Image (cartoon, rainbow, N blue to C red):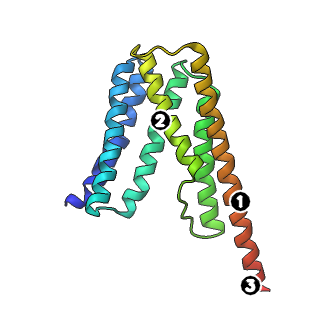
């Protein structure tokens, strides 16, 4: 029974998406920050338990990144709809993730099994996005003050990394797909 504890914790993180969106939409940024902190702690805890005790499962491997992405996308979209971030930024973050998912499905269906380990730029992008959301919630909670030029620079860095990692994924997996298709054609000839 304990083997499924990391999956249960991940499911909790998925459930936290709704209160996070509601809290941001209603301007309760300190509470949103608390929900985000709980989500971050739960992510670290489920990962630790799964690795430490060998409680890894296929479903956990799928749910964990989905929960992370949903939390991030929900935060960016909610902050944009609250008028705190530009809409184009939320569209960029969600668009990148949708492009990756659609590309993975297309690759799986048209080429073969898709077992992608996140690239370094993708990992960096995720970390920067998380730090940005936390900084934004801290700023909106008035726990820290961020000068306007620094805020704009932070938005620029997140946007550039998000765009670069999306282009990187498309380039790498597009090249792999073309290579696999070419190998198949050669083997049939």
Local crowd size for mark 1, using a 10 Å CA cut-off: few (<14), some (14–19), many (≥20): some
Specify whether 170 is left or right of 63: right
User: In terms of sequence position, does the residue under pointer 2 or pointer 1 come before the other?
Assistant: 2
Foreground tag (3 vs 2): 2
User: In terms of sequence position, does the residue under pointer 3 or pointer 2 come before the other?
Assistant: 2
**Residue at 43% across, 23% down:** 137
CA distance for labels 3 and 2? 45 Å
Q: Is residue 11 in sight in this rendering? A: no
Residues at circles 3 and 2 in contact by the CB criterion of under 8 Å: no
On residue 135, the disc is none
Q: Which residue is mark 1?
A: 174
Q: Is 166 placed above or below 23 here?
A: below
Q: Position of residue 36 (x, y in %)?
A: 37, 32
Seen as rendered, the residue at the extreme right is 189
Q: Position of residue 189 (x, y in %)?
A: 80, 86
Q: Position of residue 114 (x, y in %)?
A: 57, 64
**Residue at 66% across, 40% down:** 163
Task: Describe the element under mark 1 as helix, strand or loop.
Answer: helix
On residue 130, the disc is 2
Q: Which residue is mark 3?
A: 187
Q: Position of residue 153 (x, y in %)?
A: 62, 24
């Amino acid at each position: 029974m304990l083997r499924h504890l990391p999956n249960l914790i991940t499911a909790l993180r998925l459930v936290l998406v709704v209160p996070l969106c509601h809290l941001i939409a209603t301007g309760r940024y300190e509470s949103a920050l608390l929900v985000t902190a709980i989500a971050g702690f739960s992510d670290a805890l489920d990962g630790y338990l799964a690795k430490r005790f060998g409680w890894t499962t296929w479903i956990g491997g799928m749910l964990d990144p989905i929960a992370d992405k949903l939390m991030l996308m929900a935060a960016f979209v909610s902050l944009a709809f609250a008028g705190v971030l530009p809409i184009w930024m939320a569209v960029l973050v969600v668009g990148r993730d949708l492009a990756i998912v659609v590309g993975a499905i297309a690759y799986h269906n048209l080429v073969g099994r898709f077992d992608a380990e996140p690239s370094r730029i993708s990992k960096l992008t995720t970390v920067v996005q998380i730090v940005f959301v936390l900084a934004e919630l801290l700023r909106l909670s008035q726990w820290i003050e961020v000068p306007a030029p620094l805020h704009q620079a932070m938005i620029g860095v997140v946007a550039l990394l998000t765009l670069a990692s999306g282009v990187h994924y498309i380039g790498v997996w597009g090249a792999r797909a073309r290579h696999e298709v070419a190998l198949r054609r050669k083997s049939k000839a």
